[in-house]
Image (tube, grey):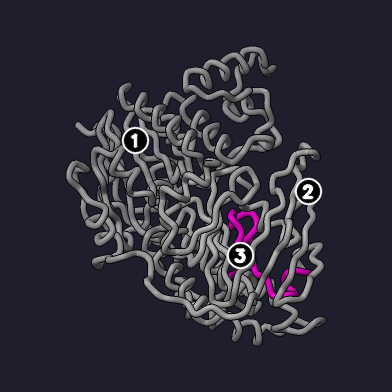
Amino acid sequence: MPLLEMREIVKEFPGVRALDGVSLSLDAGEFHALVGENGAGKSTLMKVLSGVYPAGSYEGEILIEGSPARFRGIRDSEAAGIAIIFQELSLVKELSVGENIFLGREPASLGIINWSELYHKATKLLTDLGLDIDPRSAVGNLGIGQQQLVEIAKALSQNARIVVLDEPTAALTEAEVETLFGILDGLKKRGVGMIYISHKLDEVLRLSDRVTVLRDGRTVATHAAAGLTKDTIISEMVGREVGDIFPQSAHEFGETALEVRGITAFSTDRPDKKLVDGVSFSVRRGEVLGIAGLMGSGRSELLMSIFGSYPGKTSGSIFIEGREAKICEPMDAISRGIGFVTEDRKRYGLLLEQTILDNLTLAALERISGRFITHRARETAAAASPMAKLRIKANSPMTVAGTLSGGNQQKVVLGKWLLTEPKVLFLDEPTRGIDVGAKQEIYAEINALAKEGLAIVLVSSELPEVLGLADRVIVLHEGTVRGEFTRDEATPEKVMAAATGI
């Protein structure tokens, strides 16, 4: 008997059938991957399972060990032994790690929390999971990768029998990924059933016993993972055969669009420590310059320093089309023709509660509407171009950005900067957390923008992405440039050697 069965689940929103008869089963001790493009229905299905969408708001049935289950809310789902770790972290950053793990379930007597017991339990849990994290540390002081591991520890503290992980490795370092995989292997041996949502198909094939593919809210197929290939999964996800994912195109280079000399950025926590140390580079019109390096090498800090958004002390010189530019804040960079698709689209790239229209026109509002009065008609007309060009899937420009899939949110961020008509475009992790179909569309757009003469600086943790898109690659190690390669010279071995300081 399966540990979990979801039968013929149908979930509708106004004008949209997000799930159309989706079925899924899970055995005890099984690792079942759920894959599909953004908007395929994966997260919606898991919100049904978690009680976010309560019984009565959808059709179909859920069975736990053969018995029907109707969840009125999240607590009912948790009481049934289900823990879901969503892609958007739900931690309270002002509270400690221990407080977050047991939030709402604190050990208490007569209404008084037993702090000693809480931190003792948190320490034991973190130790059992092999996590070297102080339970008394404020979550806000941890890196995003460690926060993700705390979120996982929080879920596991509930002794769940069913664990759902939604893109759990998107923000983890390689070492943290291996730690997580060790944790998951231990859970599997204990008989915990796991549903794993990820766009990283190498991970899916490495970990899974079975793989279910969703497309447009329907179940396409469920396969045994043994013998399954990435090509098969991708073709089922997108409904077509997928060849080379990166566009093959030679770019014609023009004049130097951006040159930076001696960019240095100091740590905000340790003012004597340089996170970026004297970095110089240039990028020409029509060129894609890739910046590679391991996490912590200073890639994002470098772009933020040039753009005027780095919170710490910086120095260095910036030249745009041969003229020195004084950039003290992002508005200076924007006015001089630099756009910046940031690493964290939800935190820095979007106003999630606002419409697509408001987000698309935000950075170019003065140019579109004028300095003093906003013209809605002009904004709507201006937004039509990036919506069509980038194929943003939404009912209208008035759709709230936070309701879009990850891939469409990223397209909105990209479209926002294209409306500023930039000379130079910074792309920091432009495809993080989006599916292969959306990735291909963004890769094609990057290629098209370079052909139009835009100078592009690309940062990515995915080495194949850098090598597949960049005309030239510079490699950072501990804040300094340790290598520079043309497209023909750049190999994974050479780039990784430079990234590790060799």
Q: Which quarter shows the N terminus?
A: top left
- Residue 116 lies, in percent from the top left, at 66, 12
Which sits in the foreground, 476 or 41? 476
Sort mark 1 into few (<14), some (14-19) or many (20+) by Cα contacts within 10 Å.
many
Between disc 2 and disc 1, whose residue precedes? 1
Which sits in the foreground, 14 or 393? 393
Residue carrying label 2:
312
Residue carrying label 1:
194
CA separation in Å, label 2 and label 1: 42 Å
- Three-letter code, disc 1: Met
Is residue 355 within the magenta segment? yes
Region of the chain picked out in magenta, as a range? 332-356
- Three-letter code, disc 3: Phe
- Three-letter code, disc 2: Gly
Residue 433 seen from this side:
yes
Residue at the image point whose x is 67% and y is 70% from the top:
258
Task: Determine which of the numbered discs, if any, sits on residue 429 in the image.
Answer: none
Residue at the image point whose x is 54% and y is 78% from the top:
253
Q: Is residue 408 left or right of residue 60?
A: right
Residue at the image point whose x is 53% and y is 53% from the top:
292
CA separation in Å, label 3 and label 1: 37 Å
Task: Determine which of the numbered discs, if any, sits on residue 426 in the image.
Answer: 3
Is the residue under label 1 in contact with that under label 3 (CB below 8 Å)? no
Instruction: Say above or below: 452 vs 277.
Output: below
Sort mark 3 into few (<14), some (14-19) or many (20+) by Cα contacts within 10 Å.
many
